[in-house]
Amino acid sequence: MTSQTLKRDVAKKTIYEVNSLNLWYGNTHALKDLNFAIEENEVTAIIGPSGCGKSTFIKTLNRMIEIIPEVRTTGEILYNERNIFDSGFGVEELRTKVGMVFQKPNPFPKSIFENVVYGPKIHGIRNKKKLMEIAETSLRDAALWDEVKDRLNSNAYGLSGGQQQRLCIARALAMEPEVLLMDEPTSALDPIATSKIEELVMELKKNYTIVIVTHSMQQAARISDQTAFFLMGELIEFDKTKVIFTAPRDKRTEDYITGRFG
Amino acid sequence: MSYDVIQKKGNAHFNTLSHKRRMRLRIILDKFAKLLFIASTLFALMVLGILIYRISTQSVGWLNLKFLKNNLSIFPEKAGIYGPIVGSLWLMTIVAPVTVVLGVATAIYLEEYSTKGRLHSFIKTNISNLAGVPSVIFGLLGLTVFGRLLKFGSSILAGGLTMSLLVLPIVIVASQEALKAVPGFLRDASYALGATKWTTIRTVVLPTALPGIMTGSILALSRAIGETAPLVVLGIPTLILRIPNGVMSDFTALPIQIYYWTLDSVLKPEYANLAAATIIVLLFMLFMMNSIAIIIRNKYKKRY
């Protein structure tokens, strides 16, 4: 893997560097000795069959995995050259810089406005005008502003599934994170809502580093720059998306992307 | 296609004579079960109906504005329940804050903070057991601790704290259920934005669980307002002519008054009418509280 990492564009900043990462749920070895790097302003797609550890991995990047009891990790993940598992690196601090969008849209049962400004508010921004600005910018960035600007005070659960998911993206963007983790963000959405989210991801990568877990290989091929293929907790192949989908080096990658299993 | 044709086409196993007989039997059983359940419901409603009819007829002519405004008296014609109403309301001013604060805090600790181990299940089991302890025993506890040890006597404070202990398990269990019902994905959303546990509880979990907590608390309060035994044990005096004006005042409450008037109706039969009129007032208060609980529950139906 290291050789590939070296081959890539040296000018780009490395955001995440994963070094011999292992993870266990109790006695189940879920992630096995992962090594790779994620670079600035790129979309990294993680593909693989169900249960291969892709969701586990993305949740390790902002340590959300630790909410599950009995999770144990070894190795390190360097985020901007700091190990996220260091006791000095507060998990709250990490999560303000690394936003997350979940599989199922999960807005709070509050108004659209309250949803977007939730993060800034709990981190101490009280000024109404400032919050309004943040809400507008985030909603515009999430391509939702025009649809909701007249009903910012109505409940978020009145929105459609796709709008709810874009609201969740806006909520994450309101924290002005550096990285956006997306765990199968379109798996609960219809094709039209899915394509909107995909367009949005393409737009967002100008300003954010995005890691996206996806079940859909077409989606990975459409929107990502790098693709990682996971199988049974192992990283089988990691390369430019074009290479993965046209000339994979590993037989298992080829079998998976041609639909022979998974 | 007629039913017969389907029958013939179907599995021969289901077409035998014995099968048809069994089918008929099950249909009869089904009708019987329905009747049985309707009868059970009607029985409960009938008992309630008889009770309400009895106390209504007994209280006719006694339940009027004068009865609500006057204070207690040994003369039935002059007697009113202003004192007991004020006493009951005072009791609520102690019970409501004490149970809600202690109950919700305990539930938060148990559901959100404590590690789910032996101690956790031990505490939970005991809280459930406490909910089943007879109220007279809470009365004895109140008498020992609040009445004698802390020298609160038979004041509103002693009565309120005793009642609080009695209904605390109800509030804890209801709050725990409400907290448990808050879906994990809402907590995840908050944590993923860098919120701490307490921030998440304060801003997401509690507001979402609030309708459930409030419903449980109001039902617990309505239990407290109707309880008699703990107050009897505390030694609430039979006849108090002063209206209570603070938490250390002696007092009497509606259920207590019903109890004493019913006992004394052997001396003066009119006391029974007073008791009936008081029951109507108490039932009305309970009905109002339960209605509020139902309104809250319906208003904040789950949206997520």
Image (cartoon, rainbow, N blue to C red):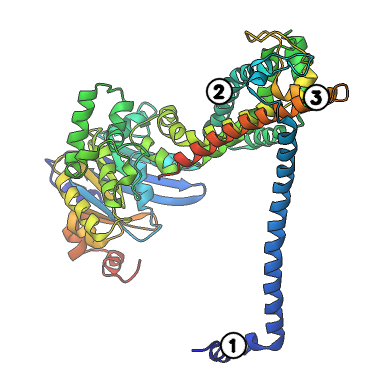
Between the residue at mark 2 and the residue at mark 1, the CA separation in whole angstroms equals 64 Å
Chain letter behind tag 2: B
The numbered disc on residue B249 is none
Q: Earlier in the sequence, mark 2 or mark 3?
A: 2
Chain letter behind tag 1: B
Chain letter behind tag 3: B
- Identify the residue at image location x=60%, y=31%: B171
Q: Are marks 2 and 3 in contact (CB under 8 Å)?
A: no
At label 3, counting other C-alpha atoms closer than 10 Å, the crowd grade (few under 14, some 14-19, many 20 or more) is many
| Mark in the foreground, 2 or 3 | 3
Q: Position of residue A232 (x, y in %)?
A: 39, 58
Between the residue at mark 2 and the residue at mark 3, the CA separation in whole angstroms equals 42 Å
Vertical comparison of A178 with A26: above or below: above
Which residue is disc 2 drawn over? Answer: B101
Q: Which of the 4 quarters of the picture holds residue B219?
A: top right
Which residue is disc 3 drawn over? Answer: B270
Which residue is disc 1 drawn over? Answer: B11
Along the viewing direction, whichever of B282 and B204 lies nearer the viewer: B282
Between the residue at mark 1 and the residue at mark 3, the CA separation in whole angstroms equals 75 Å
